[in-house]
Amino acid sequence: MATLSDDTPAAARQRAVQRGLTRLLLRDMRKIRRLIIASRLKDSVPAWVDAVRVLVDQYGQTAASAAADFYDAQREAAGAPGSFTVPLADSPPDDQVDQSMRWATKDLWPRDADVATEVQSRPLEERMAAAQVKAEQAAQRLVTDQGRQTLRQAVQQDRGAVGYARAAALGGCFFCKLMASRGMIYKTAESAGRDANDRFSGDASVVKFHNDCHCAIIPVFRGQRFELSPHAAEWDRIYREYAAGHPGDQLRLFRRALAEHDQQPLPGTR
């Protein structure tokens, strides 16, 4: 039985594709920034949101197509029987894009001094810059999620697939490292067989992604055995030793333990 892990050249290439798309997306996001006119926020922000929606749709479709190509290549390499056409994930609903951009720009609007927060009291130029960063991160997530959703859908519909795993970068955040350390998630209890337990069946946790996240989904096919990479196995060891068994406090303890014991630095800690 062939062994597959979250640290293969193919997984690294998939993350590189995601990062390449992100660079192009952010380039175009910065071009449309000029659509927001400080003296006409009420009229100009909706026009800017419309432009963001177009970019998310354009780059999201590209992300989905790239994910389908990745899935096809992985399926062929695994020798999965039969043919399968990867269904491309739909673009996010307009309401989802609108809500994300409203969140990004919520501190732009003028407020009375007695109700404004510290952030909302800063000069408009600073608030505009902060809103741009938030908008870029939210747009990146919307686009990358379309590629990841394409992979998840393919696994669910392909009889030759048994599950998928999450591949996190060495310098990823504590949340991504924890999710990656969970290993392969079986798509059904039947495909899990005797190896199944509550920690490894279902996808409620492994597919949670944050803004500016570049984790990749790795499909696993029949005849393949998934094995954690050495660094993901080390994250799992750290979690079990320092955080497991502390309901409600696992994330905080895991983050602290990573900062003290992981060889790879967490973002913003060094």
Image (cartoon, rainbow, N blue to C red):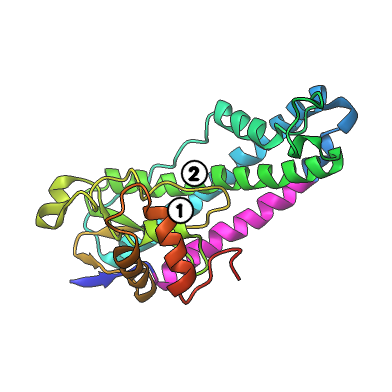
Q: Quadrant of the N terminus?
A: bottom left
Residue 67: mark: 1
Residue visible at 36% across and 54% down in the picture: 250
Residue 191 among magenta residues: no
Q: Residue furthest front?
A: 114
Amino acid carrying label 1: it is Ala
Q: Nearer the viewer, mark 2 or mark 1?
A: 2
Amino acid carrying label 2: it is Gln
Residue visible at 90% across and 28% down in the picture: 39
* Mark 1 nearby-residue class (10 Å; few <14, some 14–19, many ≥20): many
Q: Residue 153: in sight, yes or no? A: yes
Per the rendered image, the range of residues in magenta is 7-30
Q: Quadrant of the C terminus?
A: bottom right
Q: Residue furthest right?
A: 39
Give how far across and how far down residue 190 sits, in percent.
13, 47
The reply to whether the C-beta atoms of the residues labelled 2 and 1 are less than 8 Å apart is yes
Q: Residue furthest left?
A: 194
